Image: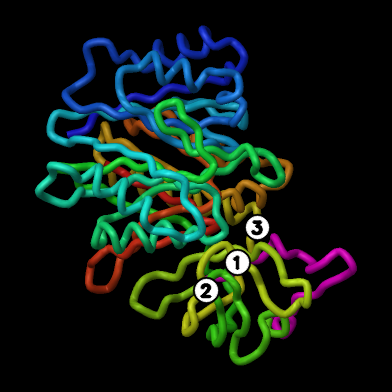
Amino acid sequence: MIKSFTAFTSEIDNIEQAVAEITSQLGLEGNLLQNTVGILSCYSEFIDSGVVDALTRHLPFDILGATTIASAAAGEFSEFALVLMVLTSDDVSFTTGVTSPIVGEDEGPLKAVYDSAMAGKSKPPAMILSFAPLLLNGDFFVGAMNKISMGVPNFGMVSIDHTTNYNHMRVIYNGECHTDCYACILFHGEFSPTFYLATLPQEKVFSEKGVVTASRGHLLEAVNGMPAWNYLQSLGLKKNEEGIIGLNTFCFSMDYEDGTAPVLRAMLAFTPDDRYVVCAGEIPVGAGVSLVVVEEEKVLTSTAQLLEEIIAQVKPGSTALMFSCLGRYFALNFNSTDELKLLSEQMRGKDINYTITYSGGEFCPVSKESANLVNRSHNNTFVVCVF
């Protein structure tokens, strides 16, 4: 069994007050069990002001996480927040680690941190919780860790921040903050998490389904034998002098054609010759793709429906770790905190301890027809791990 405690603060400048708010809300005295770890997300200025460092030095266990654009916990939400979830258990242990800087797509640092966290363990972990730096191809982390761990379920997020080029993005590990390192927690013992995800309603998926006929990693080159832009033109997309009209209003629903549910792939940009599409994740040859409309109302509807499902299914006293995509945040336009507001209201009075953090990509296993879990990287998705 894992006990969890959560805390929230929006106090950025007064270090002493921020630490006092977090520790008083947690109420950890006399409640910590044999194994404990902290999961943190924050607006990047909490690092600059010294709050993250002070909190890490104040609490006697590993704390890791990432910067974000907005978050919620303990009934509160804000774009300028720090949230901390503490997990403690006698029968589940937590081993943590952070890689050396990752250059390109070198798997070596990931293998080294996994092997170090597995030292002395005779069985594989029940789950990996991941915090990854913002790289163009988030599938690298999921694919590499899947191979290294031989398929251990991987749940997590890609770090972001509030700036246009994300140059304040950090992965956090015991007060040290990194732009090019990956941090993780390995859960060992009697631990059986359940994974949920919400994409967008089926009625917002175009009926036309194409097949990827040429691609290079995250670069979609051709669908049905046509250059990617020509294919999108055939579906009605247009461009003007400023670029593709409504680019951020659309994404792809991508089917791996392997018995798993489709995942969403955001379109980030077009190549200068307007032929190819740069996506926020891999688009493998042979995958099926359909265009999806991203709308504010449907983002909120999908969140509300998934929360209703979770509330109806989970046991009282459960813990829920939640990550929602930056694309969903942007789809809310001037009402950017509405998803957090909805979640806080819907979870009020429910005996479920939670945190939610916005991310630049979501890691969440999906079910396969054989009932095995398959690790996937997602975009424009709301993912939840409940235990």
Q: Which residue is mark 2?
A: 283
User: Mark 3 and mark 2: span between their CA atoms?
Assistant: 23 Å
Residue 348 visible within the image: yes
User: Mark 3 and mark 1: span between their CA atoms?
Assistant: 19 Å
Residue 160: image x %, image y %? 57, 43
* Foreground label between 3 and 2: 2
Say few, some or many: other residues with alpha carbon within 10 Å of mark 1 (under 14 / 14 to 19 / 20 or more). Answer: many
- Decide which of tag 3 and tag 1 comes sooner along the chain: 1
Identify the residue at image location x=28%, y=59%: 148
Q: Depth check: 216 or 194 in front?
A: 216
Number of the label disc, if any, that sits on residue 229: none
Q: Quadrant of the C terminus?
A: top left
Q: Which residue is mark 3?
A: 295
- Decide which of tag 3 and tag 2 comes sooner along the chain: 2
**Residue 251 magenta-highlighted:** yes
Give the SS element for disc 1. Answer: strand
Give the SS element for disc 2. Answer: loop
Is disc 3 in contact with disc 1, using a CB cutoff of under 8 Å? Answer: no
Q: Which residue is mark 1?
A: 279
Left/right placement of residue 4 relative to residue 279 reads left
* Segment tinted magenta in the rendering: 232-253
Left/right placement of residue 349 relative to residue 276 reads left
The three-letter code of the residue at mark 3 reads: Glu
